[in-house]
Image: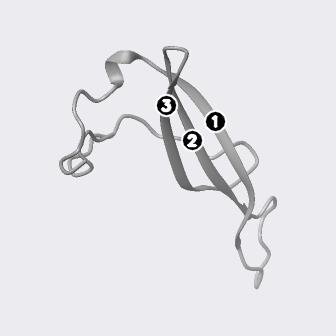
Amino acid sequence: MSDDGLSWKIVGFIPPDKGVPANHVPEALLTKRDGQGWLYLFYATQKGTRFKLTPGEDYDYRYDAIRAMRRPVPASAYPTSRAPGR
């Protein structure tokens, strides 16, 4: 998390979704709706492999899905100021 885009604080970890080896390229949207703050996170999942690889078999790095999650955000988590230059 960062208020200015320069100084960052780790506040958690998003493990891969069940049944996929990795989540990639998250894109976040923080917005308010009817007075409630919401964090939307959009991300891709890799195909990887669903079974043990045999010798000579490659890991499939391509994406197979775009997924999304939504979490409520308490008002105390909103930044109190905007980044410089904005």
> Sequence-wise, which precedes: disc 1 or disc 2?
2
Q: Name the residue rendered at 77%, 64% in the picture.
A: 49
Is disc 3 placed on a helix, strand or loop? strand
Residue bearing mark 1: 69
Q: Name the residue rendered at 77%, 71% in the picture.
A: 53
Query: Which residue is nearer to you in this view: 29 or 43?
Result: 29
Q: Name the residue rendered at 37%, 17% in the picture.
A: 75
Residue 74 falls in image quadrant: top left
Expressed as whole percent of the image width and height from the top left, the position of residue 46 reads 69, 61
Q: Amino acid at mark 3?
A: Thr
Is disc 1 placed on a helix, strand or loop? strand
Quarter of the image with the N terminus in it: top left
State the mark number for residue 30.
none
Q: Is residue 29 above or below residue 71?
A: below
Query: Which residue is nearer to you in this view: 3 or 1?
Result: 3
State the mark number for residue 31.
3
> Sequence-wise, which precedes: disc 2 or disc 3?
3
Residue bearing mark 2: 41
Front position among marks 1 and 3: 3
Expressed as whole percent of the image width and height from the top left, the position of residue 58 reads 73, 79
Q: Specify whether 74 is left or right of 39.
A: left
Give neighbour class at mark 2: few <14, some 14-19, many 20+ (Cα, 10 Å).
some
